[in-house]
Image: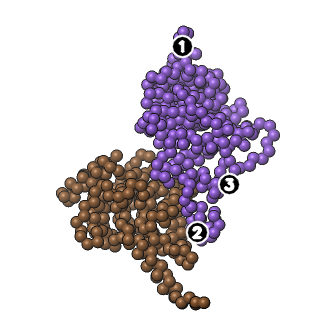
Chain colours: A brown, B purple
Amino acid sequence: MSTPFYVSPQQAMADRAEYARKGIARGRSVVVLQYTDGIVFVAENPSRALHKVSEIYDRIAFAAVGKYNEFENLRLGGVRYADLRGYTYDRDDVTARGLANVYAQTLGTIFSSVGEKPYEVELIVAEVGAAPEDDQIYRLPHDGSIVDEHGAVAVGGNSDQIGSYLDQRHRDGMTLAEALALAVESLARDSGGNGDRQLTAEQLEVAVLDRTRPQQRKFKRLLGPQLNALLEQSGEGSSEDGPSEDSAED
Amino acid sequence: MDNTRSTTGRLPAAFLTPGSSSFLDFLGDHSPELLPGNRTLPPIKGAVELPHGTTIVAATFESGVVLAGDRRATMGNVIASRDLEKVFPADEFSAVGIAGTAGLAVEMVRLFQLELEHYEKIEGATLSLEGKANRLSTMIRGNLGMAMQGLAVVPLFAGYDTVRGRGRIFSYDITGGRSEEHGFAATGSGSVYARGALKKLYRKDLTQDQMVTAIVQALYDAADDDSATGGPDLTRRIFPVVTVITADGFRRIPDSDVAETARLVVEGRRQNPDGPRAEVL
């Protein structure tokens, strides 16, 4: 009969965190940026079927990196949580803060329960408000903590490098085309060495929470021609490096 | 772990179990007491007087379908509400109009809207129009127990079929029996008169504006002969809710436009109280 080796609690938790971090670091990153009319989500994701960015509720969206089956489960739970809450109370009573709390509890419990494998995921929950000051972005790392973010945030593989690149260049009041251009530039740096990658519309998954949308549901995916037009526009915009044109949305 | 309750604040297992894209199924698993069909009714003696919604009319035209309803709710011989709205968007390409017990009907519509939206979010695709119509069938069937006690909900479902490229109408009975209607349909207490009127006015090639006028005429005729249906109220400026669903999606005709149509209809009736005449042969 073998006696298990003693492992200190600190060591056990550090090992679990290390395991989760390594899993997350293997995947490509997702960036989320505020712009004048809302929040834009950009992921490098060639798949049209497996989404990294999705709608949760009227004003709330979700972005995730890591293991697909794990964050897909969390997305499902989030949609169910939001719809049930909206049905029980009112559509206005569903908030990103509430959802982020539930996610944090779920991730935290799984992370610290010895019987379960920690989730290798990192999430972003964002809610678009009536004005840019009312926007909320929460980052939820694998261990159940919540980080309140402003401006721009990156999660996934090279998130530190991409995040600092974004922090230096993101400013308030960017147009959608400008924000998108910055997001694509930052993602292109995630190359593991050679920095000169070009990301095309086919490799990107882009969605926005647009506060100017007349519908109750503010989430919208930017696809095909619309995305190409925006990318072209931003290409011109960044070469001039300045005067902001109005982005052609919808 | 208990499937429905959690002690740690984490999402209960029912939330994280993949498989179903239906909000109703999820509600059945997680909190069945919230499902309207799971409520038990106390024994009732005699008739219960509750607000009832009345007449809903729908008609297809070349580029889509019009769905409209009067605004009255009655409770026995009392007018419970003059301005109840009984036509709702179900999603971008469909709408539902309700006749029957108003309280239950409004709840059913809320749940139906949520069911469609939930599916769309989970699956990343919308249900087919037939699929939506079938979901509504299931929900009406869930209400059968109450319907047998007099609390029936009988909706009319209309939508634009994006695959076939035309407007379609589905009518229901209290058991959830569904039938597709071709051309036009009506439900509720004034439906007999509305259908009679539409039978004489309906033509496939009417434009959207003409069809809206025909529908307002039909609702006028229903209100003319059925005390539970409200006609256009020019003094209080309460007009029928008229909605149109085309390839561009759901749109409610603004009250000001309906007001103008209603004014013309009432004007016409001053000369001709029974409305437009059809040929005898």
SS for callout 3:
helix
Asked whether residue B152 appears in the rendered view, the answer is yes
Q: Position of residue B244 (x, y in %)?
A: 47, 33
Q: Is residue A219 left or right of residue A193?
A: right
Q: Give the answer, above or below, for where A191 lies relative to B166.
A: below
- Disc 2 marks which residue? B9
- Disc 3 marks which residue? B33
Image point (66%, 55%), residue name: B32
Q: Which sits earlier in the primary sequence, circle 1 or circle 2?
A: 2
| Chain of the residue on which disc 3 is drawn | B
SS for callout 2:
loop
- Disc 1 marks which residue? B277
Image point (28%, 57%), residue name: A200
Q: In this orientation, which residue lies closer to the viewer: B264 or B60?
A: B60
Q: Residue furthest right?
A: B45
Q: Position of residue B214 (x, y in %)?
A: 51, 23
Asked whether disc 1 touches disc 3, contact meaning CB atoms under 8 Å apart, the reply is no
- In the rendered image, which quarter contains the N terminus of chain B? bottom right
> Do badges 3 and 2 share one subunit?
yes
Name the amino acid type tagged 1.
Answer: Arg
Disc 2 crowd rating (10 Å Cα; few below 14, some 14-19, many 20+) is: some
Name the amino acid type tagged 2.
Answer: Gly
Q: Which sits earlier in the primary sequence, circle 1 or circle 3?
A: 3
Q: Give the answer, above or below, for where A231 lies relative to B250.
A: below
Query: Quadrant location of residue B221?
Result: top right
Q: In this orientation, which residue lies closer to the viewer: A88 or B14?
A: B14
- In the rendered image, which quarter contains the C terminus of chain B? top right
**Disc 1 versus disc 3: nearer the observer:** 3
Q: Give the answer, above or below, for where B169 lies relative to A167.
A: above
